[in-house]
Amino acid sequence: MKKEIIEAIQEFETIILHRHVRPDPDAYGSQVGLAEILKETYPQKQVYLAGLEEESLHYLARLDEVPDEAYENALVIVCDTANEERVCDQRYKDGKKLIKIDHHPNHESYGDINWVDTEASSTSEMIFELYQAGRISGFKLNQSAARLLYAGIVGDTGRFLFPSTTERTFEAAQELVKYGFDRKQLYESMYQVPLSVAKFKGELLQSMEPSESGAASFKLTKEVLERYHVSPEETHSFVGIGGDIQGVLAWVFFVEDEEVIRVRLRSKGPVINGVAAQFNGGGHPMASGAKVSSWEEADELVQVLEATCQEYKQEKRLEQK
Ligand code: AMP
């Protein structure tokens, strides 16, 4: 699969890179990290970064305005995006050849080449492995690419904490840090939060009441977010809130954003991407997302989450007998 991707990269003179809507560091890390590898290796090729910019990720990279004509004879590579609806900038279909590179469960194949590895901690880790496979064909990695891929890996593994972190992850990280980028500054950009956000996290912890089954839910209405000066995007910095709390198995944040209520689900045991799938979402077994259109629907989702936690507890009890 990697060989096919490398051959396609060699073949095309224009390569356009996409990733998912509402990007996170792995989306940017894999998209822009791959772009940096390609620019370093093939300075004569046209390499474009498509998609809406996310202000909170400006510290990682800035993207391009891609002209429509660029797609005519282009290779398009979509990184870190499980399904077509979530690709940012729907012109991704307009190229000559399409490649999907992703680490989410592959419920929806798209494109001419699908490289999906759900064992990878992040798509950035996969891009590093693509670079390793391409070295023999002349692929080059520079400091900027190393910083981006490292940021993507760090972001998706919760700083090497989540069980998705494997030997492969540490091997990639070990190689990437050799490029000498400023790790302290990178971590500050990724993890420092405004005082308002830190205080809000404190409020959430104060109010947290996990149910008997181990589920917890948080409803962040527009009004609440405005009162605490927290943006919907900033909720990413405390979405892992239940991780270290005894008795909490899975939790959900409902974040009111424009016309929809975004759902951010996390777990320490029960598989929750099935819950997300019931509400038009998806994602990883322990970190998923969806959208609901009303607070009534949000309550329905909480019920499903409760049942999932109950079942999980029941299974654990049976296993111990
Ligand atoms: P988030 O809470 O936004 O960090 O998302 C956690 C995981 O769920 C990521 O792997 C996303 O790709 C996935 N995800 C989030 N929202 C959706 C959605 N609406 N549909 C499918 N997957 C989603």
Image (tube, rainbow, N blue to C red):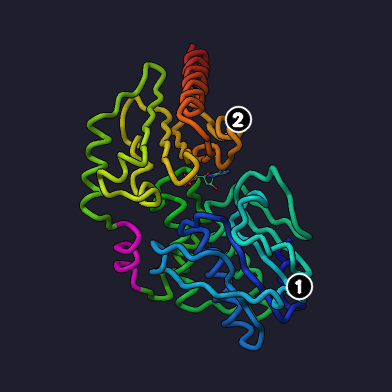
From the image, state whether disc 2 or disc 1 is nearer to you: 2
- State whether residue 120 is above or below residue 90: above
The residue positioned 65% from the left and 50% from the top of the image is: 85
Instruction: Give above or below for 247 relative to 288.
Output: above
Instruction: Give residue 260's mark.
Output: none
Q: How many marks?
A: 2
Q: Which sits earlier in the primary sequence, circle 2 or circle 1?
A: 1
Q: Outermost residue, top direction?
A: 321
Q: Position of residue 40 (x, y in %)?
A: 57, 82
Residue 98 highlighted magenta (yes or no): no
* Local secondary structure at mark 2: loop
Q: Is mark 2 within 8 Å of ligand 1?
A: no
Residue at horizontal 41%, vertical 36%? 253
The magenta segment is 182-191
Identify the residue shown where x is 29% and y is 63%: 188
User: Which residue is identified by label 2?
Assistant: 278
| Identity, as a three-letter code, of the amino acid under mark 1 | Glu
Q: Residue 205, position in %: x, y?
A: 26, 34
Q: CA distance from mark 2 to mark 1?
A: 39 Å
Q: Between 161 and 35, which is closer to the camera in this rendering? A: 35
Residue 180 percent across, percent down from the top left: 38, 75
Residue found at x 66% / y 60%: 90
Asked if residue 271 shows in the view, the reply is yes
State the residue in front, 123 or 91: 91
Residue occupied by mark 1: 7
